[in-house]
Image: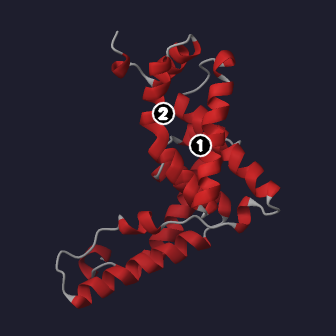
Amino acid sequence: MDSLALDDSALMLRYRDGDLRAFELLYARHKGALYRYLQRLTRDAEAANDLFQEVWGKIIASRDRYEVRAQFKTFLFQIAHNCAVDYFRRIGRSLAHHSADIAELADMIPGEEAEAPESRASSAEVQSAFRRALDALPPEQRDVFLLYEECGLSLEEIGRVTGVAKETAKSRLRYAVSKLRAVLEPHQPASIVS
C-alpha cells in the first residue's frame, strides 16, 4: 500500500517496524502545526526550536514502545504540551504566565475588501482587539483554543493532551470563544450584529 495513503497511526507503526520513510511523512505532515503551537506558547523562537527538537526526539525514542491508543496527532501534541510545561518549570515560570503569540491568528480575521486607509485602520483595530482578548484569556482556555483552532484537535483529543475530561475541554473552549466574540462584537458591521 502506498504510504502516502496511510493514516498517521499506521505510519507510526511502520516507523516502529523500521520504515524511515514513514517517519519522514509523519514529520512532513505535522511539523508546521507543531512548531506554530510551540512558538505561540513560548513566544521565543529559540525555545520553540529547542522544544520542537525535543518533541521529535521523544517520538523517535518512543517508537519501539508505540501502541495505537489514540490518534498520532493526539500523541504528538500531548508530548508537546508536556515538554512545554517542563520547559516553563525549568525556567521558573508557569504556563499560566505566558501568553500565546497570536499575530498569525489575528491576521486570519477577514479584513475589509477595500484598501482605503480607514478600512485598514479598522482592520488593524480588530486585530489588535483580538490579540488583547486572546492574551487576556485564562491560560487553560487559551491553550484549548489554540489546540482546537491551530492544531485541529478534537475536544476528546484536547482532553487527552491537557489531562482533562472532554466536557472540561468543551467548556473551556466555549468560554474562550464566548469571550473572544464579546470583544469582537463591537467591531462587526451593524448588519451582522443585528
- Seen in the picture, residue 42 relative to 103 is either above or below; the reply is above
State the colouring used for the structure image: secondary structure
Crowdedness of circle 2 by 10 Å Cα count: few (<14), some, many (20+)? Answer: few
Kindly tell me whether residue 5 is visible in this rendering. yes
- Residue occupied by mark 2: 27
Residue at x 64%, y 48% (from the top left corner)? 51
Identify the amino acid type marked 2: Tyr
Residue at x 54%, y 52% (from the top left corner)? 37
Instruction: List the single residue furthest toward the bottom.
Output: 118
Q: Do callouts 1 and 2 mark residues in contact (Cβ within 8 Å)?
A: no
Residue at x 61%, y 63% (from the top left corner)? 44
Q: Could you say where residue 162 lies in the image, as x and y percent from the top left?
A: 67, 45
Find numbered disc 2 in the image and state the secondary structure of the residue it sits on.
helix
Tell which of 142 and 188 is nearer to you: 142
Identify the amino acid type marked 1: Ile
- Residue occupied by mark 1: 158
